[in-house]
Image (spheres, helix red, strand yellow):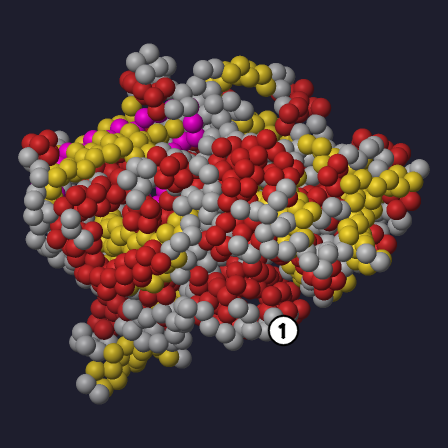
Amino acid sequence: MKASAFDYARPASVREALELLGRHGDAAKLIAGGQSLVPALNLRLLAPEILIDLGGLADLRGITVEGATVRIGAMTRHADLLGSPVIAEKLPLVAAAMPHIAHPAIRNRGTIGGNLAHADPASELPAVMQAIDAVIVVRDASGERRIAARDFFTGIYETALRDGEMIVAVEAPVAAKDERIFFHEFSRRSGDYAIVGLAARATGSGNALADLRLAYFSVGDKATLAERAAAVLGAGPVDATRLAAAQAALAEDLSPQDDQQASGSTRLHLSRVVLARAIAVLTGDASLAGRATA
Amino acid sequence: MLDVPSEALTFDLNGERVSLHVDPAARLTQVVRDVAGLTGTKVGCDAGDCGACTVLVDGAPVCGCLMLAGQVEGRSVTTIEGLERECDTAARLKESFARHGAAQCGICTPGMMVSAAALLEEVEHPTEQQVLDAIGGVLCRCTGYRKIVAAVMDAGRTRSADGAVAEPLDAEGPVGRRFERLDGARKIDGTELFGADAWPADTLLLRAVRSPHHRARFSFGDLDAFVAANPGIERVFTAADVPGENRFGVIPPLADQPVFAVGETRFRGEAVAAVVGRPSAIAALDLKSFPVVWEELPAHVTLDQALAEDAHRVHEGRAGNILVRGHVERGDADGALAGAAVTAEGEFETGFVEHAYIEPEAGFAQRVGDRIEISACTQSPYMDRDDTAKILGIAPEAVRIIPTAVGGGFGSKLDLSVQPFIAVAAWHLNKPVRMVYSRPESIATTTKRHPARIRAKVGADASGRLVGMAFDGDFNTGAYSSWGPTVANRVPVHASGPYFMPNYRARTRAVHTNLVPAGAFRGFGVPQASVAQEQLYDELADKLGMDRLEFRILNALTDDLPTVTGQVLGEGVGFRKCLEALRPHWKRARSEAEAFNAKASGALRRGVGVAGMWYGCGNTSLANPSTIRAGLKPDGRIALHQGAVDIGQGSNTVIPQIFAEALGAPLSVLDVLSADTDITPDCGKTSASRQTFVTGKAAELAGRAMRAQILRLANAGEDARISFKGGKVAVEENGRSRTVNPAALAVDALGYVLSVEETFDPPTTPLDSKGQGSPYAVYGFGAHMAELEVDVELGTVKVLKITAAHDLGRAINPMLVEGQIEGGVAQGLGLALMEEFIPGRGENLHDYLIPSAGDMPPVESIIIEDPSPVGPFGAKGIGEQALIPTAPAILNAIHDAVGVRIRRVPATPDRVRAAILAGTR
């Protein structure tokens, strides 16, 4: 089967890309790395009239540090992030997540902007962006707008992007000196999509967790910050009781789905298990792991 | 293939600048395969799930199916064909793949090679983890990955756990040696041609119109108007266009599957019509516009629906939706169980399992005068020939089947897939017609492993000896018969396992539903039965307080004990030796697991499990002959007509090894002609673990016959030594040498100066009304031990190691044997932990999970050679044997680790955790 016939444009500048997008509206689809879009085209789940290839927009590629902010161009590939010493140093949670994203062949094409715009609820980066409190920088013909990652993802494959807008960059605060991170995902097959994943970070020391952010993915229709659980854990030194209360609170924070790979109840359970493991790592108190409620 | 735009796309392809007029929105795989003609890059899914299409773009691996032509403008693309030129490490890698036996069917090999070369360019001496990461996105269904990992590490001058490599080809005494596959080089360099890789110029493309419902009535609109409205479409075919019988099936008396459904479809994905036309027109066609109206009808999607008293009949004449029943009975099972000191019983369930070979079905047909020629992937050329002849209403001899290389089969390519469609279309149009299944089409419509629902009870006396077993199994055979009868008949013969079971009753039913036909899949139902039987034996051992391995050793079938069909094999029953070979591993693993668990404070618990297996080689109580032909050519070389289709298992290598050994010559004198119904005599189907045994025996007989003819010509005795050199045949005896000059001898009709043709059909007897008799001449035996880790919080299972002991009589080529074992283990692991196909859901390789490289544990193969008195040089089969005990060994190890029985596979985290919570200890 061939993807249905469509026009193909390769603009040389963001301005030109936005012009094309403005002109064609819903009939157009932006293509970055294409690692989610092309399968959908191949299976004819999508049939745009025109594809606007962002591959020529060199100014959307690259990682820069400006003061306390790391800026990642939308067309920066997963492989670039994985190999970047800047990311390893300044955004360690991003670095920790990268090896879990698909396989080398996909990472060599897939981009951060494409990934975030696709908003796959099983994808790692939408959660990581929320955990590190990133801002998604989007642009349309009239100018730029900055959207907090926590407000960007609105549903399954749905984002706060408006018609005529595209992601141009992601900005995130450089990790604090005392930043502690945790990233883990459970999958049914090695290297595969997670059935539950958690990207977490906090500052502070010992059992006192400040600025704790727990971003779950593959649980529910979008990557989600577990705010109630984080609030419980942030209210005082973490002990087994507090952890159990936070695990209970996940039932309010998350809306796990049933699918072929796992039931919703299993997902909620796994979310609690991974929370305990995260807290054990973040606090350095190994005894807190393995405290999953049934 | 593609619409041609005005602007050319310019990029470097394998080091050369090319300018091609292609649609920038075409996939890169289409550009390199269809436009540039480089078919070494394979297409397995078109969705980035399988990695077979991996190519390098600017030196980095990418999925060719996920990149658009426009995106490679100005870049450098390297395919398998240019790998050696572009990567310094590629030559070393090729050589290493060959020496390690890292390619089996070869369909994933280009993707593996490209991914591995990219790694070695970056990392000179990679670790095993780096190799696993690098090939993690490339799926392989044959090898179990271990030999691939070993080959990459060896090429990187490091060592994996698995070390042994092949010997040079010119060695004398070919049987028992680790030879490289004779067809290995072309699999590794990407020149092997699979079903989708070659077609004549101006070939038309065909797509099938298929039912979206499990069961539906349908009617067509105006087909002529549809053709008229779509330029480039030549014709639509329906049932009315089938010249002969609109019916096929692998078991002719039960043939029931139409080429095109008439009036009503019986399963989701059943074809009702085919559209044929110019490739670009067909590729662009949206089949939603095809004029057909569906009326969905109530469907049986479960066994219980089909077995309900008032259930509609899927086929008229098959009362109760029962296709066939199987039955084996010996002694008094109920009486023995009533008197047993201990019993164990349970109900077990397995689901549909998809073969998931990386090559979707593909091929082309062309009419040649009043004959039709079909070049497609298949496991059974002569069966294809006979069924196609019936469909076209012509003589079998008027059909020529030329199997392409087969990118994995595992049973499903025994049945017709593309063949009827392309044959009917090519016959009418008198033009070549081609069809390539999409991955969703392949998964939705080709046969699956039968879902089973099994109730079984076993009993033993106080001394631990088995006294009786009662077994009832229902097998969901789907909408058409396929191999349902074979499963229903084979399971009762095997459900005891290879143990002495004096009282026994096993009954099976193959039940029709409105789901995809279930057919042959490596083991024909025996893997499902072993999931039940081997778990129950563990329960018996536990109740008796016996060691689970020693319980099996005590009850193991021996040469002089009768099987459940009353057959006394007399010799070659090496099962006990397999179990005894596991004993030191068992003790080591048990004590390691015990020590681990004693110290464990976290969520991980280790367990060890064992399971036994047996499997009869060849058809059950039915003739299944193979014929091998060979000829001495005037140039002094030997032509071997080897008709056993090599689907990756290695018959292209093993059959010549056997022939050469019997002839007394090195492999290098053979010119092997592979399967083609015009050239090679019938070697039967590649299934039932029969090719090494049955075709191998025919090859042994043919080799001996050729030897006898040469010796007669040289007037030499049996012990003379034959050598081939410089176009002459030298025969040495007692220090004297005579030379035969083939060029000086008269040739026969085939162009040979000496010709032989030998047939072997394994001796079996029919089963009587109680299933008593000798259904197989030879059984293969084996036992696996699984060591694993369960995370009790998550319900996840990680297999740490499989130790696999197999009695295969004689290992003709130990390297290929290991390949079969490792590949079987991978599929058994999938059956145990991952795989379940739900019709209508997950018809792709990201929802349907097969093990990837990182899921595969190391496998230690232990080869036991208890020779069969019948097989060639004592050999028995190994293809299916290798898969059967893995799943029950894993399930028994899960029980050992956490004390719960998983009676429904796959043992997903959901199910394992639910069992732990339920505390079914």
Residue A6 appears left or right of B113: right
Crowdedness of circle 1 by 10 Å Cα count: few (<14), some, many (20+)?
few
Residue B855 appears in the picture as rendered: yes
Q: Is residue B722 above or below residue B109?
A: below
Residue B57 appears left or right of A147: left
The residue nearer to you, when weighing A143 against A252, is: A252
Residue B273 appears left or right of A127: left
Q: Residue furthest right?
A: A142
Q: Which residue appears at 35% of the width and 76% of the height?
A: B171
Q: Where are the magenta residues, as a range?
A: B501-524
Q: Which residue appears at 63% of the width and 42% of the height?
A: A235
Q: Which residue appears at 76% of the width and 46% of the height?
A: A134
Instruction: Give residue B791's position: percent from left, percent from top.
Output: 42, 48
The residue nearer to you, when weighing B381 against B784, is: B784
Q: Residue furthest bottom?
A: B735
Q: Residue furthest top?
A: B310
| Dot 1 amino acid type | Asp
Please, which chain is the residue tagged with disc 1 on?
B
Instruction: Give residue B169's position: percent from left, percent from top.
Output: 39, 73
Is residue B685 part of the magenta span, yes or no? no
Q: Which residue is mark 1?
A: B88
Residue A248 appears left or right of B34: left
